[in-house]
Image (cartoon, grey):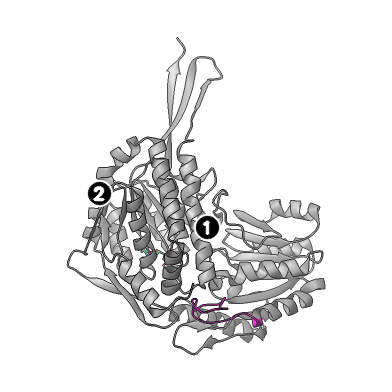
Amino acid sequence: MTITATTEDRLLADVPSGLLVNGVWRPATGGETFTVIDPATGASLAEVADGTPADGIAALDAADDAAAGWAATPPRKRAEILRRAFDLTIEHTDDLALLMTMEMGKPLAEARGEVTYGAEFLRWFSEEAVRISGRYGLNPEGTGTTIVSHRPVGPCFLITPWNFPLAMLTRKIGPALAAGCTVVVKPAELTPLTSLYFAGLLLEAGVPAGVVNVVTTTDASGVSSAIMADPRLRKVSFTGSTAVGKILLKQAADNVLRTSMELGGNAPFVVFDDADIDKAVDGAMLAKFRNIGEACTAANRFFVQKGVADEFAAKLTARVEALGIGRGTDDGVSIGPLINEAAVSKSADLVADATSRGASVLTGGSAIDGPGTFFAPTVLSGIVPGTRLLREEIFGPVAAIATFDTEEDGVRLANDTEFGLIAYAYTTDLARGHRLMASLRAGMLGLNAGVVSNASAPFGGVKSSGLGREGGLEGIHEYLDTTYTMLPAS
Ligand code: ADP
């Protein structure tokens, strides 16, 4: 498909610009709006409603009013609506992908991949909606029957980030709707257009009024605090930074809310001497440079065993030097802009800190002049303990390589972090691979794999990377309460 300015303008004209409350698009109270920017050019894309705390409460009113009706809707009907939403999402792949590229910056091919991946949560959970089962059994004493069942937790608040504008939303909406919960969505203010367009598809799919409400706002803290303080809310599901996750966990304590938290990562990518180095480099390109490095699953720290360190660094550098940089709509681009100036400064600061401690820049290493907020894809070697990017999430296209001697050292370095979302390891030794499954402390492991995300698998972290799981058989239980009935033996 050739993308022209006309294609883009036509698409932008189709995106709703209001708040979705109780099935109706409407302006924010007071009529305020904010501007959405294209990070590749700095140009304004659209104006959308800037919701207030009162708008947030109006959305919760609608979600609460719709809750009983949606919970009582037969699972098959909920499943069919979700399945229709899957079909519509796939039918609108071109539009959704282009919107994501325009407002977030990722290359168009990756944006299309996100539509496929994101839509899959709608199909997966449409299939799960009809399989919410319980348990029935005699208790050990033989004095009664135990009946275990599940019911929707109630109105949910879903807060999503800007880096995967569609998939982070479908990962929450799919299981919430399948379980019978109604929701208020607050998309990231940097990328609201994809969510607004997608919400339109949900209405077209037959999602009843009030079941999904969307509040865009630049006042994330104000809108969120109002919703979190309302006792009708029963659950918050958040994807974003650990700092904001901690604020929400504290707020959640007041009303003892159910919480799902997909927070920051600091993924180690460990390459052993016995690894297939070409495959490890393929995996590294995906784990580090997919989504311009702006992923919580992005490899943040490369630990390479000494015997293969030079070969790995040279091969990785050659691949990185061949990456096309530009606006994600242009042919041959695999590195788009970072989301904003702050992201560029952060990558620049982390590289400066590493080089000040003796790291070598093998390629890249600096920001690229505007327009747009670009940072050159970078490989650093000779990273030493104490370097900031071993502790901080880079969220940019910077690969930082350190070396290690033994398996024990590699594992110790990999685990030396407060985070635990994902680890990557490359080895051809089966016994070692098996040991790593136990020794690497993360919620997910890519064993000779640079991408692990799949709707059928439980995505989530341990330690400061979060609580709960999205996807898999586990995902729907984040939106279900377990209840138990004791029936005495007669
Ligand atoms: P990032 O640093 O990657 O932008 P954030 O954690 O700041 O990640 O943002 C993720 C989401 O959290 C966005 O939708 C943002 O608007 C929202 N957010 C930011 N601050 C708050 C807050 N105090 N309460 C609730 N949501 C917030």
Give residue 235's position: percent from left, percent from top.
37, 48
Viewer-side residue, 231 vs 65:
65
User: Which quadrant of the figure has residue 417?
Assistant: bottom right
- The amino acid marked with disc number 2 is Ala
Q: Residue at x 58, y 67 (%)?
A: 298
Residue 71 vertical position relative to residue 292 in the rendered view, above or below: above
Viewer-side residue, 396 vs 322:
322
Residue at the outermost bottom position = 369
Q: Residue at x 82, y 64 (%)?
A: 274
In the shown orientation, is residue 99 left or right of residue 212? right
- The amino acid marked with disc number 1 is Tyr
**Looking at the image, can residue 264 be seen?**
no
The part of the chain drawn in magenta is 321-337
Image marks 1 and 2: residues in contact by CB distance under 8 Å: no
Magenta stretch, overall SS: loop
Q: Residues within 10 Å of mark 2 (few under 14, many from 20)?
A: many
Residue at the outermost front position = 1
Residue 18 vertical position relative to residue 466 in the rendered view, above or below: below
Q: CA distance from mark 1 to mark 2?
A: 29 Å
Identify the residue under disc 2: 62
Give residue 171's position: percent from left, percent from top.
46, 53
Identify the residue under disc 1: 117
At mark 1, the secondary structure is helix
Q: Residues within 10 Å of mark 1 (few under 14, many from 20)?
A: some
